[in-house]
Image: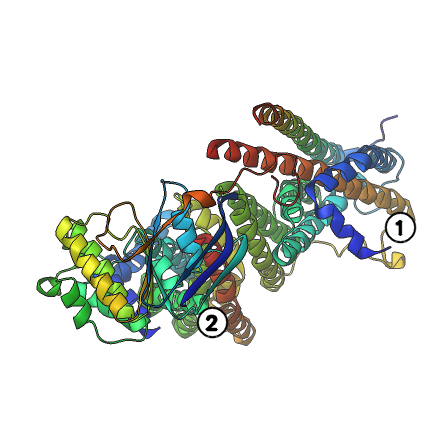
Amino acid sequence: MIALLVRDLRLAMRAGGGFGLGLAFFLIVVTLVPFGVGPQSELLARIASGILWLGALLACLLSLDRILALDWEDGSLDLLATAPLPMEAIVSIKALAHWLTTGLPLVLFAPVFGLLLSLPEPGYMPLVLSLLLGTPALSVIGTFGAALTVGLKRGGLLLSLLVLPLYVPTLIFGAEMARRGVEGLDITTPLLMLAGITCGTIALLPFASAAVLKVNLR
Amino acid sequence: MNLNALWAYANPKKFIQATDRVLPWISILAIVSLVVGLVWGFFFTPEDYRQGSTVKIIYIHVPSALMAINAWLMMLVTSLVWIVRRHHVSALAARAAAPVGAVMTVIALATGAIWGQPMWGTWWAWDPRLTSFLILFLFYLGYMALWAAIEDDDTAADLTSILCLVGSVFALLSRYAVNFWNQGLHQGASLSLDKEENVADVFYYPLLVCIAGFVLLFIALVFLRTQTEIRARRTRALLARERMG
Amino acid sequence: MMPDLGKYAEAVLSSYGVSIALLVVLVWASLRRARRVKKQLEDIESKAKRDG
Amino acid sequence: MVLKVSDLTIARGGIKVLEGVSFELESGGAIVLRGPNGIGKTTLLRTIAGLQPPLAGRVDADPDSLVYAGHSDGLKATLTVEENLMFWAQVFGKKEISQAIDSFELGRLVNRPAGLLSAGQKRRLGLARLLVTGRPVWILDEPTVSLDTDAVAMFASAVRAHLARGGSTLIATHIDLGLPEAKVLEVGPFRARAAEIDDFDEAFL
């Protein structure tokens, strides 16, 4: 299992795209927003937490189809499925690798992008914390979507259509937590809900993803 | 009645024979109760003292909203039956119900928006209920798109069933999330089993007739569409057999 | 015969109109597809029976 | 006996392709599956490897004894030959890859990224993967595609060495592998007959 994780991380680094691409996309979103809504820093400060969450979510979405599609194309998935690893472990590792290459960099760089959007001072900790708690759920849910669409030729758009509604609760609680942080309100409730969603998806969704992937490998 | 006897209708041929017998009656009943309910509601009920004539919209809004949710519940049940017992008719019934449920969701959304315009002064408000229905509609879209995208019927049935299961959990979660996110403008439920707390009798009885009409219409449509899906599936199987030689 | 809908006439009429139109389209589409698929299956079945 | 297939019926895309397939594979034995394109050899191998469920019948084998190699080798273009092999060895809980490298004469290529290999070299690397898994029963689907005659001979000697160690193999192929000791199993006779048209039940045909 560790071998699979190491391989996926190594592949992400060798291919060049893995680590950087999502981050670059995030930066572009953050850069474009002021062009769209105007440069007034009070306005930006008010919407900064929401934009950052949305940007992170879209950057995550962008890289989902790579989670399984490459291994599908070169036959690795067939071979992994017949290897002595349970399918649930394979999809969990895949999700973890995706989070380490996409979600974690987003979390780490979010404060920098917060500066660009004049995120108010008290908002940084809750924002980073909410992203740290929420992005693993995005990766796990995304892996489920990727498993559903892995055999399809033009699955990218369908993948987005399937995954986005599933992202709604995570986005609501994550963005709400970041927003409350900015306004200096109590963040306990959304924090607990967000943590609950993440734990729940990590614990349960791999079974669905594995079942779906087995069906697609038939 | 012996519940086990119900499984006999999981056979496609039996299903078509049985539904062919009842379909005309259900269709007639559906049309009669819809016409009676809507005419009663539209022409023969008074205005509400607060909402004026817009109260007449509930005869469409409430039944369609109910059916939008019940259609998804039915798909959830039939998906589970497919996963557990592998009856093809069950999976096809879920497929047949999805577009009906989606249209019901659209009707609920449209009537809600039209109602909201005079009541709240805006076509669209990010009210928890409206928002939840919008999300439900997205789930219907994704579900139907997944069915349409996969060529192999059994694979599609498996994948959509699991999507329906997972989607149900997330839809429920979204409902709570949306409630938390915005305490809404929407009035409380207009119906509950306890009639005392409800809308007045004058509105209540025609509403019940309308709900019955929508339920019957839904059943008739699902029977008809399931028959169609069964026949389409058999057509594909025969064509494939021809190709195999 | 027509009830007086007052200032909300537009809202009430348009919501009935939109909903009934959607339902009619749904029923019509279902019936049309049902008829087509039934015919297609009958054609193929008779052909398959003929050819063995 | 390491693999026993009894009365197996398999389907592809909802259509029965083979039925009543039965055979046994002994330790140290080899079976070559033959038959025209599209008859269902790949589906049969995938069913035996456990990738898809059979419609009927049984496959009896220790699931920890099988290793499957399909049309694609599952190689990563940006990883070197050594990294690719090492990964599969680790997945199967092994560490030793030098023997596999020697058997398929990959020694000069260990540090080359797999993406820069020729088609034949890739195939050899894919076959070397079988050795590093340490599993006794090889299920191979067209293993000699894009191999030249020398490489086919290399493959044959690797299989022979594997059999001599008590391993066994099930191979679907079109060409003569130069393995006279292998039993040939024609798949043609197991071809499923078309289902009755009136049989309008669960399976729709």
| Mark 1 element type | loop
Pick the quarter of the image with the C terminus of chain D.
top right
| Up-down relation of residue B152 to residue C49 (above or below) | below
Q: What's the residue type where badge 1 is placed?
A: Ala
To which quarter of the image does residue A10 belong? bottom left
Could you say which disc has been placed on residue A173 in the image? none
Residue B58: x, y in percent? 78, 44
Q: Nearer the viewer, residue A9 or B182?
A: A9
Q: What chain does badge 1 belong to?
A: B
Residue A13 seen in the figure? no
Q: Badge 1 is on which residue? A: B200
Mark pair 2, 1: CA separation: 45 Å
Could you say which disc has been placed on residue A181 in the image? 2
Give the crowd class for mark 1: few <14, some 14-19, many >=20 residues within 10 Å.
Answer: few
Left or right of D189? Residue B204 is right
Residue B231 seen in the figure? yes
| Up-down relation of residue D133 to residue B231 (above or below) | below
Residue shown at 72% from the left, 32% from the top: C20
Q: What's the residue type where badge 2 is placed?
A: Gly
Disc 2 + disc 1, Cβ < 8 Å: no
Residue shown at 53% from the left, 32% from the top: B239
| Mark 2 element type | helix
To which quarter of the image does residue C6 belong? top right
Left or right of B174? Residue A162 is left
Left or right of C13? Residue B76 is left
Pick the quarter of the image with the N terminus of chain D.
bottom left
Q: Nearer the viewer, residue B215 or D57?
A: D57
Residue C13: x, y in percent? 74, 32
| Up-down relation of residue A95 to residue A165 (above or below) | below
